[in-house]
């Protein structure tokens, strides 16, 4: 059997969208503040289009979604990529609703809470197969639990928000943006039914990250406002502080992708300050692992997006990776170190960083359109580690 064809690069999608709009190459370049030469090299695959802000700007001018430019791995390369069964989860998300009780028996909420703790542990270990054997059933139960009498109803809604957040992460790691978005919106619906400002903010965070950040979705752009609205409700609640901190990091990302580097830095500093004042700077039980080390992971990514690879490496060197109680967060750090080292022209060192990330979280690496675009640009590098990863991503 012959090898499947590589997936098309982002530059080809940009060219097709530009021609469909009837826009000249130079006109597109001018509208996004780039040179015609730069735009030409992107379309011809000589430069990687791997910064969220550039993708967002091009998508806006061409009036297409950033999702369509990023694309997903084609079906013909799926055999090279990690897979999970989506049948049950898709059924739950498509068939059930918060305001319509499904005919599903509900176990004790103590039991579903134990399942949620197990699912969270499996996510941290990137054991997605195990997650998908349990997550859909728990999600179905909690839809039914949302119609129990109080106080069980409120507890079921909190748990439903939590399981939807877990679903968002897994679906994003596997390139399933549509299911991630439904999961994020289901979290929002549960939060509306609950009526608690902290949990509403938590659900807003899930929704903000249900689509690629280059899409600049309204949910992501709303992060600064949601954080501002949450601030008066923080009090002494550790979870409230953690949700607030993660929303500030989301606001930083939204600002950076929008091209406002100063505002991105302001939000990131606020998040870092919140993390440094916590009783436990890297609490392994913190909501979304908010803490000093995770803030460092986010700031590394922001520096890469700002086009400052030296600063990204400096920040990443200060991150205590042992304090990150999750393989996928450690993988994220190595992925951004990979991008920074590529920008610095240190391609072999970059390949080793990506290898570390792939060993920690294969799906997260191989389904990342930004990483895939950078790897595609590096295929001329005669490095067996890099070429192995490129083959597994369907790039060569």
Image (tube, rainbow, N blue to C red):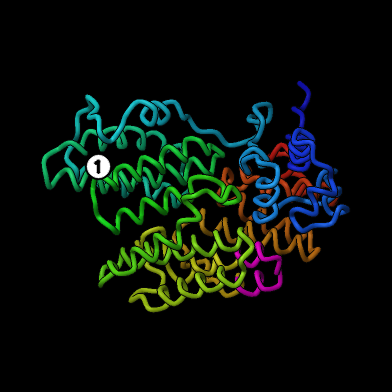
**Magenta-drawn stretch contains 232:** no
- Horizontal side of 32 relative to 167 (left or right) equals right
Q: Which residue lies furthest to the right in this view?
A: 37
Is 308 inside the magenta-drawn segment? Answer: yes
Spot occupied by residue 318 in the image (x, y as percentages of width and height)? 57, 75
Q: Nearer the viewer, residue 343 or 354?
A: 343
Tally of numbered discs:
1
Nearest to the observer: residue 232 or residue 285: 232
Q: State the residue at coordinates (29%, 59%).
A: 198
Magenta-tinted stretch? 301-315
Residue annotated with mark 1? 112
Q: Residue at x 57, y 56 (%)?
A: 331
Left or right: residue 279 versus residue 368 is left
Q: Which residue lies furthest to the top in this view?
A: 1
Q: Which of 172 and 10 is in front in this view?
A: 10
Lateral position of residue 318 relative to residue 33, left or right: left
Please state if 53 lies on the left or on the right of 107 as rendered: right
SS at badge 1: helix
x%, y% of residue 109? Answer: 19, 43
| Rendered-image quadrant of the C terminus | top right
Which residue is depicted at the point 53% across and 65% down?
A: 252
With respect to residue 64, does 370 lie above or below? below
């Amino acid at each position: 059997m012959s090898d499947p064809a590589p997936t098309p690069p982002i530059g080809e999608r940009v060219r097709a969208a530009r021609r469909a709009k009837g826009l000249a190459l130079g006109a597109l370049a001018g509208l996004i503040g780039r040179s015609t030469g730069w735009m030409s090299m992107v379309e011809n695959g000589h430069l990687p289009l791997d910064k969220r802000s550039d993708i967002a700007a091009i998508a806006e001018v061409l009036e297409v979604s950033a999702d369509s430019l990023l694309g997903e791995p084609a079906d013909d390369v799926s055999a090279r990529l990690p897979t999970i069964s989506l049948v049950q989860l898709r059924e739950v998300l498509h068939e059930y609703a918060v305001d319509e009780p499904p005919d599903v028996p509900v176990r004790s909420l103590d039991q579903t809470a134990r399942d949620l703790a197990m699912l969270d542990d499996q996510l941290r270990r990137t054991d997605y197969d195990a997650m998908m054997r349990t997550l859909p059933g728990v999600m179905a139960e909690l839809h039914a639990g949302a119609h129990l009498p109080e106080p069980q109803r409120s507890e079921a809604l909190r748990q439903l928000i939590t399981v939807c957040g877990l679903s968002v992460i897994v679906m994003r790691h596997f390139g399933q943006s549509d299911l991630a978005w439904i999961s994020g919106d289901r979290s929002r619906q549960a939060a509306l039914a609950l009526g608690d400002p902290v949990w509403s903010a938590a659900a807003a965070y899930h929704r903000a990250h249900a689509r690629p950040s280059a899409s600049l979705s309204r949910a992501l752009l709303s992060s600064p406002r949601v954080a501002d609205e949450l601030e008066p409700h923080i009090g002494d609640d550790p979870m409230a502080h953690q949700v607030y901190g993660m929303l500030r990091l989301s606001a930083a990302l939204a600002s950076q992708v929008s091209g406002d580097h100063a505002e991105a830095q302001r939000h990131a500093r606020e998040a870092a300050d919140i993390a440094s004042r916590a009783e436990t700077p890297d609490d392994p039980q913190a909501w979304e692992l908010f803490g000093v080390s995770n803030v460092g992971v986010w700031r590394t990514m922001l520096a890469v997006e700002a086009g400052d690879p030296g600063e990204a490496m400096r920040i990443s060197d200060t991150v205590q990776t042992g304090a990150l109680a999750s393989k996928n967060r450690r993988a994220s750090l190595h992925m951004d170190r990979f991008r920074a080292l590529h920008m610095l022209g240190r391609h072999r060192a970059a390949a080793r960083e990506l290898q570390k990330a792939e060993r920690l979280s294969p799906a997260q690496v191989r389904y990342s359109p930004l990483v895939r675009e950078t790897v595609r640009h590096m295929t001329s590098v005669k490095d067996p580690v890099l070429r192995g990863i490129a083959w597994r991503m369907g790039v060569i």
